[in-house]
Image (cartoon, rainbow, N blue to C red):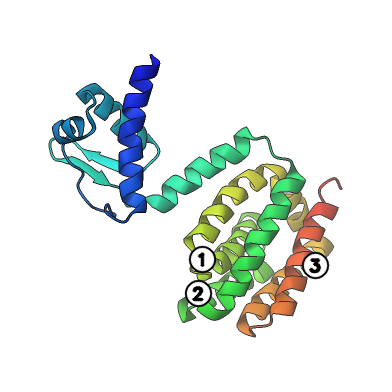
Amino acid sequence: MDKVYEKAYEKVIDYIESNILDGHFEVGDKLPSERELSQMLSVSRNSVREGIRILEVIGVISSQHGIGNYIADHFDKTLVQVMTMMYALEKMTYNEIREFRYAVEFQAVVLAMDNISHEQIEKLKANLEMLENSADEEEQVMSDKMIHYTIVEASGNRLVMANYLALAKIMDNFIRETRSKIMTNERKSMTFQGIHRHLVEAIFNRDLELGKRALDEHFVYICKNMDT
């Protein structure tokens, strides 16, 4: 691919990007046809197709055969996929991921205290009850994850959620065995359940200090049990 061609399809990408940033294109808007873009930007139809194909791959555009190209509305899913791969490709260490995930979850706790819905509160209660009372290890692990996910969801911030989901996928590779070891050790499991109860109670009571302490306990406890 020569430099002239690269500049041509980048011109298409830049045009669409600038129109999104300026607010001229919004989710669901139909783009000008390939012929119109070709004439407007003084590039070939092939360059237009290449630019659109790249934007479709990264999730900015949704192409509907025979109908046209539209600004996509699956931002969250695309962002999670891209971020997950980038975190993996960067070969980040467990500590880097843990530190960033802590920051994301702490922000989620802060926001959730103001934004959590009644339905989400009930979901937290149900998952805490399952975590504390289920004898099934898989159910306990799922309840643990759902408590954190529900708090992040309750933040109401899509960037917080996208970062959390991407980080959680990567972090699971580090802590899957650790979590299982904790759940199968009665004493450790009781401690872990208590930490989650403190976290849930912090949300109910709008107690930010308790929430921070519970998150500190959670991440320290996971780290302490990584190699035991």
Height in image: 192 above or below 86?
A: below
Residue displayed at 17% across by 41% down: 32
The amino acid marked with disc number 1 is: Glu
User: Which numbered disc covers residue 191?
Assistant: 3
Residue plotted at (69% across, 47% down): 176
Looking at the rendered structure, which numbered label has been put on residue 153? 1
Residue type pointed to by label 2: Gln
Q: Real-space Cα distance between discs 2 and 3?
A: 24 Å
Q: Nearer the viewer, residue 4 or 138?
A: 4
Q: How far apart are the two marked residues, 1 and 2, measured between alpha carbons? A: 8 Å
Left or right of residue 46, residue 2 in this image: right
Q: Quadrant of the N terminus?
A: top left
At label 3, counting other C-alpha atoms closer than 10 Å, the crowd grade (few under 14, some 14-19, many 20 or more) is: some
Q: Secondary structure at mark 2?
A: helix
Q: Which mark is residue 120?
A: 2
Residue 169 seen anywhere in this rendered image of the structure: yes
Q: First in sequence, mark 1 or 2: give its number.
A: 2
